[in-house]
Image: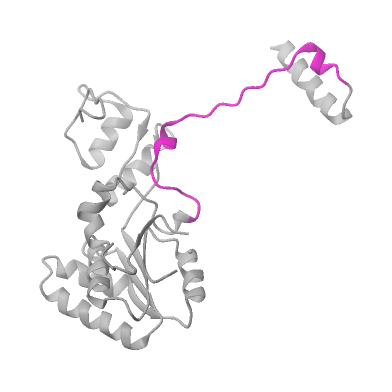
């Protein structure tokens, strides 16, 4: 907070915190913009107040897509799939691989690691409903599917797509999602407020540009307006001038 030069900090959460920021309370002044992730209630509240204030996006649940070659470590892949599956029953974890035996090894690792996972019921429900291990004929075909999915996180365990946060795991295979979520994304300052639900096709991660307001400025001199040009353009300029004159 000191590094950010923050002058006000409020401990609040949930949909009620969104309402307080959007409309103001006796102790919390209203703001112009609300950003950051939250649960389903926070996301719904942000959608409700949009227009009264600006927001970054409606995000969630968590997603990860892993593009893996047959040579990649199935233990790491399973751990990374579970890192998202344990977030939420509606989270999505998908692995694309080019090998059926490799897919079976990943499946086996998922089953083994689930047994010791503290949130295994949530992770199991997520994998059952929104998880998949897909064997594809080529990386090109996989890339086409990945671009269509446009996942929140894309992890590449290969030499090879729309995606937002990319952890590249080859050749050392140690740029794992399980580590960045807990440490590396803080250390390397990668953004973790990311679009989900396929919106990565047209949304970007939260960034400095979200806090910049862009304004267009138009200025004409009398001489410039009198320069001969396209008749339609002269008519438009005349209409603008007449409307301004009436006002």
- Looking at this view, name the residue that lies furthest to the bottom: 101
Quarter of image, res 199:
bottom left
- Count of all numbered marks drawn on residues in the image: 0
Q: Viewer-proximal residue, 17 or 209? A: 209
Q: Which quadrant of the rendered structure holds the N terminus?
A: top left
132 to the left or right of 215: left
**Foreground of the two, 151 or 155:** 155
Name the residue located 26 percent from the left edge and 63 percent from the top edge.
84
In this view, 35 is above or below 222: below
Task: Tell me if I can see residue 55 in this picture.
Answer: no
Q: Where is residue 2 in the image (x, y as percent from the top left)?
A: 20, 27
- Quarter holding the C terminus is top right
Which residues are drawn in magenta?
201-227
Q: In this view, does 28 lie above or below 92?
A: above
What predominant SS class does the magenta segment belong to? loop
Q: Give x and y (percent) for residue 60.
A: 33, 54
Left or right: where does residue 198 sit relative to residue 17? right
Residue 115's quadrant in the figure?
A: bottom left
Closest to the observer, 128 or 166: 166
Q: Residue at x 84, y 24 (%)?
A: 234
The answer to whether residue 211 is above or below residue 145 is above
Percent of width and height locating residue 221: 75, 13
The residue located at (22%, 69%) in the rendering is 79
Name the residue located 28 percent from the left edge and 26 percent from the top edge: 24
Left or right of residue 39: residue 240: right
Residue 97 in sight here = yes
Residue 93 at x, y percent in the picture: 31, 68
Asked if the magenta segment contains residue 163, the reply would be no
């Amino acid at each position: 907070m000191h590094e950010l030069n923050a002058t006000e900090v409020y401990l609040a959460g949930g949909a009620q915190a969104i309402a307080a920021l959007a409309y103001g309370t006796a102790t919390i002044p209203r703001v112009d913009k609300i950003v950051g992730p939250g649960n389903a209630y926070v996301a719904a509240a942000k959608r409700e107040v949009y227009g009264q204030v600006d927001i970054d996006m409606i995000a969630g649940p968590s997603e990860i897509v892993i593009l893996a070659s047959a040579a990649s470590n199935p233990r790491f892949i399973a751990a990374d799939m579970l890192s998202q599956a344990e977030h939420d029953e509606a989270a999505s974890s998908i692995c694309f691989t080019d090998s059926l035996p490799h897919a079976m090894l990943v499946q086996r690792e998922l089953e083994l690691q689930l047994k010791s996972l503290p949130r295994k019921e949530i992770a199991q429900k997520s994998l059952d409903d929104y998880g998949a291990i897909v064997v594809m004929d080529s990386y090109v075909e996989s890339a086409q599917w990945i671009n269509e999915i446009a996942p929140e996180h894309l992890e590449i365990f290969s030499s090879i797509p729309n995606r937002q946060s990319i952890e590249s795991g080859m050749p050392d295979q140690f740029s794992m999602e399980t580590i960045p979520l807990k440490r590396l994304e803080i250390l390397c300052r990668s953004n973790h407020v990311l679009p989900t639900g396929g919106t990565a096709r047209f949304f970007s991660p939260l960034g400095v540009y979200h806090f910049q307001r862009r304004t267009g400025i138009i200025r004409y001199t009398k001489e410039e307006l009198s320069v001969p040009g396209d008749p339609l353009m002269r008519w438009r300029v005349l209409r603008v001038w007449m409307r301004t004159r009436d006002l």
